[in-house]
Image: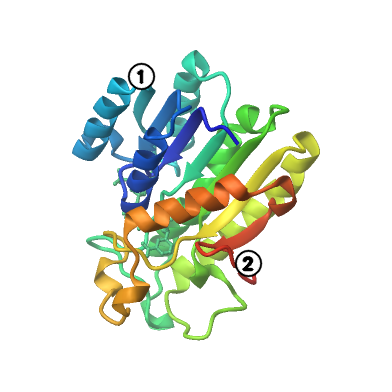
Amino acid sequence: MSLQHVLVMGASGGIGLAIAEQLSAMKDMKTLVLCAAHATASPALKTLGETCHARGIHAMIIDVDVSDESSLANLVSSLKESVPTMDLVVNTAGLLHGPDLAPEKSITQISASAMQRIFAVNAFGPILLAQAIWPWLRAKKPVVFASLSARVGSIADNRLGGWYGYRAAKAAQNQFLKTMAIELARLNPSSIVLALHPGTTDTALSRPFQAGVAAEKLFTTEFVATRLLQLIANATPADSGSFVAWDGQTIAW
Ligand SMILES: NC(=O)c1ccc[n+]([C@@H]2O[C@H](COP(=O)([O-])OP(=O)(O)OC[C@H]3O[C@@H](n4cnc5c(N)ncnc54)[C@H](OP(=O)(O)O)[C@@H]3O)[C@@H](O)[C@H]2O)c1
């Protein structure tokens, strides 16, 4: 698959930035749309934008909140002006913790407002993004929509409990993606929709939870970006609607 026009959501984050950097080095790349909640405030994205410019790639750096429909509508307006077609959309936007937000160890720690924030980004974000860019996805040409889920979103694999909101939000994302894959396949048989598990990766998102992770199981963002881009490159429409880990293994829902 020749990747020429690509959108990365969450491009300022650990995995998103590494994916965007590797995409910018691909020889056929023509358009890179780099989005995140605070994309224009990211020094790393500014540098990547300059690198793209030097390589003759049209880079667009756009602030988009995936949980906000008006923000997504603004993205669509920008895309309509200059991005007629898309080959790949990678959604790496995600939320696990923050200054006043921590994954729940017990049901006693659950709060509706925290779950709403977690669901807004991890569950609703991917499907609202897909809805916003639906005209690009349903165009009758090969296109991949790959969104980062997490193994902890697997109900079958839930052995440890905890992390109620994040687990449930990723499980909800998986169901949204599977449902969308079915609809999109009817409209655009050459489309591919993937829910991807990156493995535990050394980023701001995982940093507070890395203590018990063996060194060889904590991946660099560069390694994960390479593996996920390989998976995407090798995927076929028959794989659409699947939940796959960084190593190509299918994960049970
Ligand atoms: N790291 C891991 O070990 C691991 C494991 C399994 C799954 N994952 C999943 O992989 C994905 C990437 O994780 P990461 O480790 O790279 O996280 P990260 O470094 O914390 O990056 C998160 C990215 O999401 C963006 N984002 C957050 N809320 C957003 C919103 N409302 N709208 C748009 N963008 C938003 C952030 O943008 P701003 O910085 O501009 O706010 C940032 O670019 C996430 O979905 C995560 O759940 C990660």
Q: In this view, does 104 lie above or below 9?
A: below
Is the CB of mark 2 within 8 Å of ligand 1? no
Q: How crowded is mark 1: few (under 14 residues within 10 Å), some or many (20 or more)?
A: few
* Label 1 SS: loop
Measured as percent of width and height from the top left, residue 243 is found at 61, 61
> Which secondary structure lies at badge 2?
loop
Q: In which quarter of the image is the N terminus?
A: top right
Q: Which residue is drawn at 37% across and 74% down?
A: 217
| Residue named by callout 1 | 56
Nearest to viewer (mark 2 / mark 1): 1
Total count of labels: 2
Q: In this view, does 184 lie to the left or right of 24?
A: right
Closer to the camera in the image, 78 or 22: 22
Q: In the image, is 2 to the left or to the right of 163?
A: right
Percent x, y of residue 19: 39, 45
What residue is at 41 percent from the left and 57 percent from the top?
224
Q: Where is residue 208 in the image (x, y as percent from the top left)?
A: 25, 70
Q: Which amino acid does label 1 sit on?
A: Gly
Q: In this view, does 204 lie above or below 193?
A: below
Vertical position of residue 112 compared to residue 158: above or below: above
Q: How far apart are marks 2 and 1 (CA)?
A: 37 Å
Image check: 107 left or right of 186?
left
Q: Where is residue 23, by image quadrant?
A: top left
Can residue 166 be seen here? The reply is yes
> Which residue is at 64% across, 69% downward?
253
| Mark 2 surroundings: few (<14), some (14-19) or many (≥20) residues within 10 A | some
Viewer-proximal residue among 66 and 149: 149
Q: Name the residue under label 2.
A: 250
Quadrant of the rendered image containing residue 128: top right
